[in-house]
């Protein structure tokens, strides 16, 4: 392979075909079904599907076949089946649904307002991970241009990942003959520790979403006449949360939600810190003199990748401060996001959470729990020598730096599904979500030069694929 020609082809293709399409994609508020229950009625999903399908039809490799699956009441699935010229099967994965808007965008930016500034494309979904379909096809076309042999490649794009991929098991069964048995899985939905090298993700946390409603009255009453006598629903909710989490340290107290961290992952984290140093702290937009939960950077990274953690991501029953009268509210609803480590059984974790929140409720208050589909974490299998060599070669060629591995605190449900279904498969989990890229939050951006070189690395790794 002529690496200079490959780089020229991919960089040019990004400029002419991918970036303009991502600009159009960002404009569409294609929120995942969990955040837009009326997604079918609103039609944004269909608009994105049409955009992706039309672009794929225009740019797909010769002799490849695009397949679209639509089951009633489910989000769609887009597949691109590319015949190979050597033995083996590669599965490439991405998604085209988005997180909701989130507050806090800079005045000149917005979730559905694509802006290119300082070689970064701002807007919701470009980096997480709308670019994946287009970059995957770009990486394959670059090989085709140089007539390089590759195995059969299946690009799989789903539309419910940000909701925990509830529709994916259905399509995995429906399309089992098409999917076959992948030897290598390439996922472009993960993160990067910096923008200077190729990063591979070796672990992902799982996720338990839970709505907890604590009710004390049928309707709100004057706080002057009731407070003190009628217990506050917020205080009861707070006491229930203390059963899950030590509020002083953030430690999750349930043994079912904790696991022993493998020694190899601790060593990988130490290597990560040796490369990035205090960048793992500085990447966050800290407020004033705010400090992290620990001054030990290795422990800090492990806390966000291999330890459980609770976040309160939403609430109901509380008016805005501008409209808050002196009323003892009848209920408090909190949306909980519990990250669980790899190798933790999500069903046992859900059962443990439900039991402790339903047991011994203060004052006999009414507690309603509504769990979302729990997503399992993932721990990568040991990589074969050829793959390690291929990753090292690609990173040195296109970034002029050695690659590095990283654990991620986020969740990609598809990886856990594939890991169970295809235990012999090898994995390259990577992505463009580096420092300050802020997926799910305000001011999300895609680092365009990094994405271009990452695409080159994917082409290189596919070229070096070896079938066993």
Image (spheres, rainbow, N blue to C red):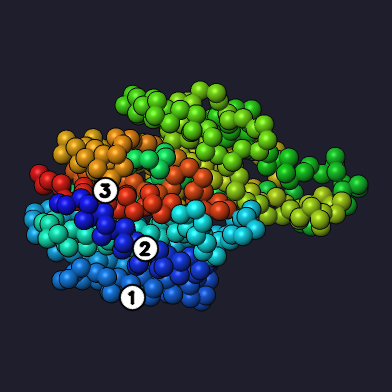
Up-down relation of residue 125 to residue 225 (above or below)? below
Dot in front, 3 or 2 = 2
Q: Which residue is at a point 61% across and 55% down the rendered structure image? A: 105
Q: CA distance from mark 1 to mark 3?
A: 26 Å
Kind of element beneath mark 3: helix
How busy is the neighbourhood of tag 3: few (under 14 within 10 Å), some, or many (20 plus)? many
Dot in front, 2 or 1 = 2
Total tally of numbered discs in the picture: 3
Whichever of labels 1 and 3 marks the residue nearer the N terminus, that label is 1
Q: Is residue 421 left or right of residue 115?
A: left
| Image-quadrant location for residue 56 | bottom left
Q: Which percent across, then down, holds residue 376? A: 39, 45
Up-down relation of residue 373 to residue 157 (above or below)? above
Kind of element beneath mark 1: helix
Q: Which residue is at the front of the view, 330 or 403?
A: 403
Say whether marks 2 and 1 touch (CB < 8 Å). no
Residue 54's mark? Answer: 1
Q: From the image, tell me which residue sits under label 2.
A: 15
Q: Which residue is at a point 47% across and 54% down the rendered structure image? A: 120
| Image-quadrant location for residue 126 | bottom left
Residue 457's mark? Answer: 3
Up-down relation of residue 128 to residue 379 (above or below)? below
């Amino acid at each position: 392979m002529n690496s200079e020609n490959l780089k020229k082809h991919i960089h040019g293709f990004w400029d002419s075909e991918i970036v303009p399409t991502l600009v159009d994609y960002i404009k569409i508020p294609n929120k995942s079904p969990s955040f837009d229950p009326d997604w079918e009625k609103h039609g944004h999903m269909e608009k994105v599907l049409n955009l992706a399908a039309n672009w794929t039809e225009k740019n797909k490799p010769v002799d490849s076949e695009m397949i679209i699956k639509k089951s009633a009441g489910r989000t769609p699935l887009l597949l691109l089946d590319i015949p190979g010229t050597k033995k083996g099967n590669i599965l490439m994965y991405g998604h085209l649904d988005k997180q909701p808007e989130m507050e806090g965008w800079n005045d000149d930016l917005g979730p559905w307002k694509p802006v290119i500034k300082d070689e970064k494309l701002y807007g919701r979904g470009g980096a997480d991970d709308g670019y994946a379909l287009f970059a995957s096809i770009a990486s394959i076309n670059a090989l085709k241009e140089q007539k390089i042999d590759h195995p059969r490649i299946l690009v799989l794009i789903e539309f419910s990942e940000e909701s925990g991929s509830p529709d994916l098991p259905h399509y995995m069964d429906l399309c089992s003959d098409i999917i076959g048995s992948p030897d290598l899985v390439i996922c472009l939905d993960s993160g990067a520790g910096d923008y200077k090298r190729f990063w591979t993700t070796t672990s992902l946390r799982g996720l338990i979403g839970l709505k907890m409603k604590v009710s004390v009255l049928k309707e709100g009453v004057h706080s002057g006449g009731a407070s003190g006598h009628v217990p506050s629903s917020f205080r009861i909710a707070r006491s229930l949360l203390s059963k899950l989490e030590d509020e002083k340290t953030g430690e999750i107290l349930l043994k079912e939600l904790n696991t022993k961290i493998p020694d190899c992952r601790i060593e990988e984290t130490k290597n990560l810190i040796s490369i990035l140093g205090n960048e793992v702290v500085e990447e966050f937009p800290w407020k004033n003199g705010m400090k992290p939960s620990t001054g030990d950077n290795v422990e800090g990274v492990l806390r966000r990748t291999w330890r459980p953690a609770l976040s309160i991501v939403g609430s109901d029953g509380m008016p805005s401060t501008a409209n808050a009268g002196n009323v003892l509210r009848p209920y408090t609803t909190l949306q909980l996001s519990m990250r669980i480590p790899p190798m933790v059984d999500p069903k046992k974790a859900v059962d443990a959470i439900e039991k402790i929140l339903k047991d011994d409720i203060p004052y006999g208050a009414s507690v309603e729990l509504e769990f979302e589909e729990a997503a399992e974490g993932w721990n990568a299998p040991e990589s074969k020598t050829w793959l390690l060599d291929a990753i090292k070669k690609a990173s040195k060629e296109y970034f002029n730096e050695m690659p590095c591995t990283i654990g991620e605190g986020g969740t990609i449900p598809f990886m856990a599904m594939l890991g169970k279904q295809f235990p012999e498969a090898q994995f390259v989990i990577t992505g463009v979500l580096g420092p300050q890229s802020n997926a799910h939050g305000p001011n999300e951006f895609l680092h365009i030069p990094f994405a271009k070189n990452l695409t080159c690395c994917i082409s290189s790794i596919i070229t070096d694929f070896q079938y066993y």
